[in-house]
Amino acid sequence: MGLFTHDIKTMDDLFLHQLQDVYYAENQITKALPKMISKATAPELKRGFEVHLEETNRQIERLDEVFRLLGKDAKAVTCPAIDGIIKEANEIAGEVEDPRVLDAALAASAQAVEHYEITRYGTLIAWAKELGRTEIVPLLQATLAEEEATDRKLTELAEQRLNHAP
């Protein structure tokens, strides 16, 4: 077993670890989004980030409810994947001077985050069903639907406005 998986022996352990991982990720995203909002210059992108920050806070509340339904304390475990995605986003955004290029970079970075979250929530839903934890599936599905909608909105915005070369 790997360095971070020493306590994972069962599917329940794996599910809980993944849940704690995504809990950490959502909390890190709430810290990263205000920076992205302040850097975005396209009004639609800035507003999209603001809306997603509100959604992310509601998603954390849903995760708190999932933990409660499982009889577990809401706890995060460090997620190197989301840390890396956010670090890369910050590095790229710090290097771009042209506001139009910066907005395209911010949208791409946000989509990397969304894709990560989509895979995590999809996996959690499948595992919750397998483990017979059907009471938490609707909470996870609600968040997955929001993540997928955000990804679609970012794609539309990028294709219609942000990805056009100056």
Image: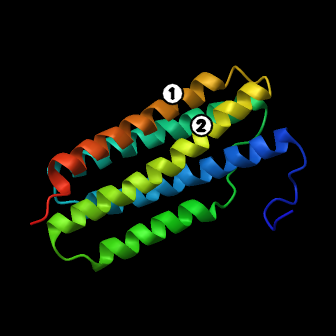
Residue beneath the point at 75% across and 49% down: 17
Which image quadrant: the C terminus?
A: bottom left
The amino acid type, in three-letter code, at marker 1 is Ala
Residue beneath the point at 15% across and 51% down: 161
Q: Are marks 1 and 2 in contact (CB under 8 Å)?
A: no
Mark 1–mark 2 distance (CA, rounded to whole Å): 11 Å
Q: Quick one: label 2, few (<14), some, or many (20+) residues within 10 Å?
A: some
Give the residue at mark 1.
142
Instruction: Using the image as rendered, state which of residue 28 and residue 1 is in the foreground.
Output: 1
Residue beneath the point at 51% across and 33% down: 143
As helix, strand or loop, the secondary structure at mark 1 comes to: helix
Residue 21: image location, x then y, percent: 66, 52
- 94 above or below 11? below
Rendered image: mark on residue 122:
2
The amino acid type, in three-letter code, at marker 2 is Gly
Answer with the quarter of the image where residue 34 lies.
bottom left
